[in-house]
Image: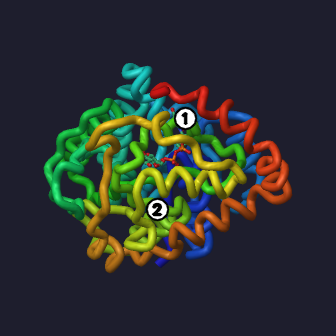
């Protein structure tokens, strides 16, 4: 059955793919995002096919307009690291207060179905345990981002909504393009070379969110979004592969964060999430070839200047 779906953070990394899947399934999509040159450019691509509601999600009045006639809410809008770590006040306001206001507005307006984008950051760094990470592994976030996502989850548990919480693993943008988000390439330096990573294509996350709309069995569940065994690798393999897709040679090991456990997440048990949401479509290999294609001829230019680019990139590492 087609639904009217409110999608927050609609013009960001995962949001844009989510719009595509929702439209493909015949849903009406109401998109909420900040009005920025990048987000407006993305919105123009959808023209009359979506309704855009522009505004600041920390303003409770925004929800009154956005929720009219809505059946389901997919809440992606958030600030992510590194901003969450340098600006705690903003992270609290955007990630926690706005989510609490949205929940209150939904309860007031009688909108029941809520699908929330959380993160494996709620577990903190727990690679001292045997993999895989399961939905009920212990929560001990050790960064502010993870704290904010866990606070949202607690507010959701205390609500009267029909919720699903989807905890996303490592899902950076696949293409060099400006979307509304706040991704920062320097994050790669936080991924220690020997850490266990489970990548997931942002489009596959989007598919999980879109499929959750019609999946009543997902109600009341915490589901892990990782790409599956074909997306599991070490931090070193991950960083080399991502850089390689853009024509950049591997960076030396010593400029990456040291020590274990040195990044959150792990290899994940995605048996239940995949059974319910059927979202794992891309291996890491396929995602990298997608990245490589998006770079086009620039790949050869970057490759040619690789020996010059490499030290410039390395100089941006805080762990040199
Ligand atoms: O005050 C704000 C801050 C952000 N956004 C929007 O939120 C979206 C965030 O997207 P982006 O920064 O590209 O990140 P994603 O990779 O899409 O982040 C998704 O995946 C993360 C986990 O990997 C989750 O934490 C996020 O909630 C979820 O949106 C963007 O459209 C932003 O414009 C707002 O609308 N208002």
How crowded pointer 2 is (Cα within 10 Å; few <14, some 14-19, many 20+) is rated as many
Q: Disc 2 vs disc 1: which is toward the camera?
A: 1
Front in this rendered view, residue 286 or 111: 286
Disc tally is 2
* Kind of element beneath mark 1: helix
- The residue to which callout 2 is attached is 200
Task: Judge left or right: residue 127 versus residue 138.
Answer: right
Front in this rendered view, residue 249 or 283: 249
Question: Residues under labels 2 and 1: Cα distance?
Answer: 19 Å
* Kind of element beneath mark 2: loop
Q: Residue at x 39, y 63 (%)?
A: 226
Front in this rendered view, residue 85 or 38: 85
Residue 201 location, x and y as percent? 52, 63
Q: Residue at x 17, y 59 (%)?
A: 130
Image quarter of residue 280: bottom left
Query: Which numbered marker is on residue 186?
Result: 1
How crowded pointer 1 is (Cα within 10 Å; few <14, some 14-19, many 20+) is rated as some
Res. 256 in view: yes
Residue 175 location, x and y as percent? 67, 54
Q: Residue at x 43, y 31 (%)?
A: 94
């Amino acid at each position: 059955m087609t639904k009217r779906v409110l999608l927050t953070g609609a013009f960001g990394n995962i949001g844009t793919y989510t719009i595509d899947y929702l439209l493909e399934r015949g849903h009406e999509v109401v998109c909420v995002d900040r009005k920025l040159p990048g987000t407006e450019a993305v919105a123009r691509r959808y023209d009359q096919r979506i309704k855009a509601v522009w505004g600041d999600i920390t303003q409770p009045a925004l929800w009154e307009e956005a929720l009219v006639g809505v059946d389901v809410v997919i809440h992606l809008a958030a600030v992510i690291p590194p901003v969450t770590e340098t600006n705690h006040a903003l992270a609290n306001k955007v990630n926690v207060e706005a989510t609490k206001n949205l929940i209150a507005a939904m309860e007031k307006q009688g909108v029941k179905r809520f699908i929330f984008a959380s993160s494996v950051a709620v577990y903190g760094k727990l690679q001292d345990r045997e993999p895989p990470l399961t939905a009920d592994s212990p929560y001990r976030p050790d960064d502010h981002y993870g704290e904010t996502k866990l606070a949202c989850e607690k507010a959701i548990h205390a609500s009267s909504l029909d919720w699903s919480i989807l905890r996303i693993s490592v899902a950076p943008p696949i293409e060099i393009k400006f979307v509304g988000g706040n991704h920062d390439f320097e994050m790669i330096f936080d991924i220690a070379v020997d850490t266990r990573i489970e990548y997931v294509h942002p489009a596959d996350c989007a598919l999980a969110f879109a499929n959750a709309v019609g999946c009543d069995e997902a109600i009341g569940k915490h589901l892990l979004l990782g790409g599956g065994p074909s997306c599991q690798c070490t931090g070193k393999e991950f960083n080399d592969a991502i850089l390689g897709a853009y024509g950049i040679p591997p960076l030396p090991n010593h400029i990456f964060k040291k020590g274990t456990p040195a990044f959150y997440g792990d290899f994940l048990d995605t048996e239940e999430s995949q059974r319910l949401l059927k979202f794992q479509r891309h291996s890491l290999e396929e995602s990298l070839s997608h990245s490589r294609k998006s770079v086009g001829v620039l790949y050869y230019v970057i490759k040619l200047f690789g020996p010059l680019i490499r030290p410039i990139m390395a100089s941006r590492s805080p762990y040199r």
